[in-house]
Image (cartoon, grey):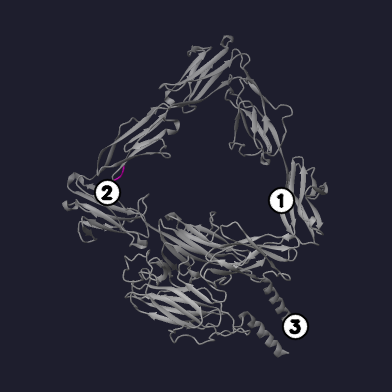
Amino acid sequence: MDLSYGVLWLLSVLLEDISSQGVYAPPTVRIIHSGLACNIEEERYSERVYTIREGETLELTCLVTGHPRPQIRWTKTAGSASDRFQDSSVFNETLRITNIQRHQGGRYYCKAENGLGSPAIKSIRVDVYYLDDPIVTVHQSIGEAKEQFYYERTVFLRCIANSNPPVRYSWKRGEEILLQGSDKGVEIYEPFFTQVGIKGETKILKLKNLRPQDYANYSCIASVRNVCNIPDKMVSFKLSNRTAPPSIKLLVDDPIVVNPGEALTLVCVTTGGEPTPTLTWVRSIGMLSEKTILNSGTLTIPSITSEDAGTYSCIANNNVGNPAKKSTSIIVRALKKGRFWITPDPYHKDDNIQIGREVKISCQVEAVPSEELTFSWFKNGRPLRSSERMVITQTDPDVSPGTTNLDIIDLKFTDFGTYTCVASLKGGGISDISIDVNISSSTVPPILTIPKGKSPMVSREGDTIELQCQVSGKPKPIIMWSRADKEVPMPDGSMQMESYDGILRIVNVSREMTGMYRCQTSQYNGFNVKPREALVQLIVQYPPAVEPTFQEIRQGLGHSVTMNCRVLRAYPTRVLMYEWRLGSRLLDKGQFDSQDYTEFTVTINAKEHYGTYNCSIINEAGAGRCSFLLTGKAYPPEFYYDTYNPLWQNKARIYSYSLQWTQMNPDAVDRILAYRLGLKQAGQQRWWETEISVEGNIKKGELITNNLTELVKPEPYEIRLTPINRFGEGDSAIRLIKYSAPINPHLREFHCGFEDNNICLFTQDDTDVFEWTKQSASTRDTRYTPNTGPTTDAAGSKHGFYMYIEASRPRMDGDKACLLSPVFNIAQKNPYGSSNSAYCFSFFYHMYGRHIGALNVLLRLKGQTNTEVQIWSANGNKGEQWHQARLNIHPTTSFQLIFEGVRGHGIEGDIAIDDISIVEGECTKVDQPATIPPSGVLGTLVHIWLYPIFLLLSVLSHQR
């Protein structure tokens, strides 16, 4: 007996848990398509393949269910090689790509998640079809044996085209179609391998031992068998005894040396080739500059600069043999970066310059071209020539390019003075560079020191700081700054920074810049001696980093809340103060001891206790702040989007909508007293508002319904819903409702002509072989199957829409396509839940063509398990006109209607349907087959998950 009570208690807990979930449900997802698909098919029963022509519009829609409303995310991977999501995403139900290109093909994923269960993911592979213009190239093979005893001449015509799907080729000589074996002098084959750089399929036409009849016009036709209505493409080539590969000549020097600012013209001419080659210029590195002027074989570069230097090539191509190529180099004269250094006598350890010792002055520049560089030396403005005591040399260009040296042997007092080296280019046109070096008794090596009080340097994050090294000596060298404590870049991204005054200026200092910095003398513009160096320490202070920076807390009156603010990091850490404030009012303050957090508790006894609580944690560098928004506002409502048939119509120009929602976290704050409902037409400014009162407590997952009436057809409306409690108004939720086909919560009347974009909420069956297509006679292409399908819709309009099945390739005999209606709910007639509703169901169908298969209509009754029964069927050719079918149906529960099209044994088998109508009450003129199921075919169903519990209770009852 105790066990029986235990089981009953467990059952009550289970039912309570299920009840608490209400209408909350994890997401489900499926992908539907529209736009200009060539074909949609199932591949290996696991992946949907959508083929589309390049340049058309791809449109995929992700239909989701689940509550709360799932967030939708579209992602793409390149083909089937990887399932890893890319960073680029589209957060929208509909993915639309206009003018789709081949690189945009691949697998597209729709991912939906709402925080319940696992995310729902569906994918479809998009295959972009295209055919590029084919290209014919001609190659010649000449083999010669010794002493000319044997001579053979063979020509290969190679046809190449990029395509998807793979291209098929055919060859013609004049008007004659060439086939393998039709001419002994001709072979047609595919190469065993493809040359590097050649993309696409290749077909070779081999002409062996050229004959007079082989000199003719040849055509290569590339075809993808008209898939996606892609037409064949053809290219022609005239082969004659004058056919020859290109040859060219450059009418310029190599290399070409020019001065900046000059205009330069490169000329390339053809010296042979049939057909006449085309000429173009390319640059070895990068693209041609935008300022260049290209006219066939002539390339003009106006106002040339150093950036224009490089190798330029002229290429001639006539698709015979290999392209001809000639190149020339452009060198733009330049002189820059003049530097010097002084080297004391290397045979003495003393770095000073002294009378009687040797001293060397070195001068360096960067010169282009280096072979034109010349140096001149002057002393006190007078030319200086090389002598036994003053030796002028130029360093080996391979060791130290652009360098000259002046060696003064046995320095005398009379040698003191200003020495000048002048760098110039022989070609002229470039300004000389002069470098002055003073040699005197005051010329001394550098000394590097850190000024007093300049290390360590303390700065706050975000400030500008200057690190200083003081350099003395004459001349003063360039100072190099680098990090001394770690191998990391300097603030400008380089490993070393130059300074001419010894100061390193850092803007917007960050905490990562804390550490030791090394300043070091360089040899440039100073002494070529062992570098002097010094260290400067930088300390960057920053205010405390805290968490949470912001947190919203919702709580009702009469409850307590504890807020916690934690320090993550700070410098300095030795003095940390905290302050708690509500607005400007100080609540608490203190100093940290050993803990890294502070707490504050508030009891909410009045509305004045709500507001923003700020906790400031302070050190010398500033303050970090935790903010807590304490509010009694109710959470926003969650609109329910999965309502079956929320829209219905009772008047000609008026429609109604069943608005449903749940309340997010209804127990988080005080009880919801009412909702403020706002409504306005989309695009208008004025809101109409009303209040919806709430009795009792709202449970989590409880579905609330409010019927919106007197909505003007077909206007969309914006809905704003705001919960109200003792605190006041809570957070609002906004959604848009749109008029669509009149589908009622309790079916009275339904009409569908497939004119709306959502095709009256009809859907494709995921388990069939292919799908129904929305079409109008004005957009249908009848060139390939002219003897099947309708020429108007059921009303006689060429612009009206209908649904049809396409029997053309790749459809096979017996393939099925199923179109599912929305789910219709029937009105209950008595309190016991049974119903004997009768409905008149009618539709128009078109079955014209000598290969017509069958059209079947099935009634699916919804329950714990679905039951399907065929209620109407027709097959074979019914002539080139629309026919109407009318029959009574007697569903006992919610139901769907399924239109099943079956493909016949040929391509002239298109079947169409239009103008579907379901009206309450029997048809005035009954025309129904005997296959209609009797009333009550599907009785009351028991939830299958309750069976084990009932069985267990039965066993326990026997044991008792």
Q: Which quadrant of the view contains residue 857?
A: bottom left
- At label 1, which amino acid type do we have? Thr
Residue 502 shown left or right of residue 740 in the figure: right
Residue nearest the observer in this picture, 456 or 650: 650
Magenta-highlighted residues: 319-323
Q: Is residue 935 above or below residue 880?
A: below
Q: Main secondary structure of the magenta part?
A: loop
Where is residue 800? Give x, y as percent: 41, 67
Q: Which quadrant of the view contains residue 410?
A: top right
Q: Nearer the viewer, mark 1 or mark 2?
A: 1
Mark 2: few, some, or many residues within 10 Å (few <14, many ≥20)? some
Identify the mark nearer the N-term, 1 or 2: 2
Residue visible at 80% across and 56% down?
609
Q: Which quadrant of the view contains residue 499?
A: top right
Q: Which residue is mark 1?
A: 549
Q: Which residue is mark 3?
A: 5
Where is residue 416? Give x, y as percent: 58, 12
Under circle 3, the secondary element is: helix
Measure the C-alpha gap from mark 3 to mark 1: 52 Å
Residue 321 on the magenta segment: yes
Question: Looking at the rendered structure, which numbered label has been put on residue 139?
Answer: 2
Q: Is residue 836 above or below residue 749?
A: below
Under circle 1, the secondary element is: loop
Tag 1–tag 2 contact (CB < 8 Å): no
Residue furthest toward the top?
414
- At label 2, which amino acid type do we have? His
Q: Nearer the viewer, mark 3 or mark 1?
A: 1
Where is residue 812? Give x, y as percent: 37, 72
Q: Is residue 539 above or below residue 820?
A: above
The quadrant of the picture occupied by the C terminus is: bottom right
Is residue 408 something one can see in this rendering?
no
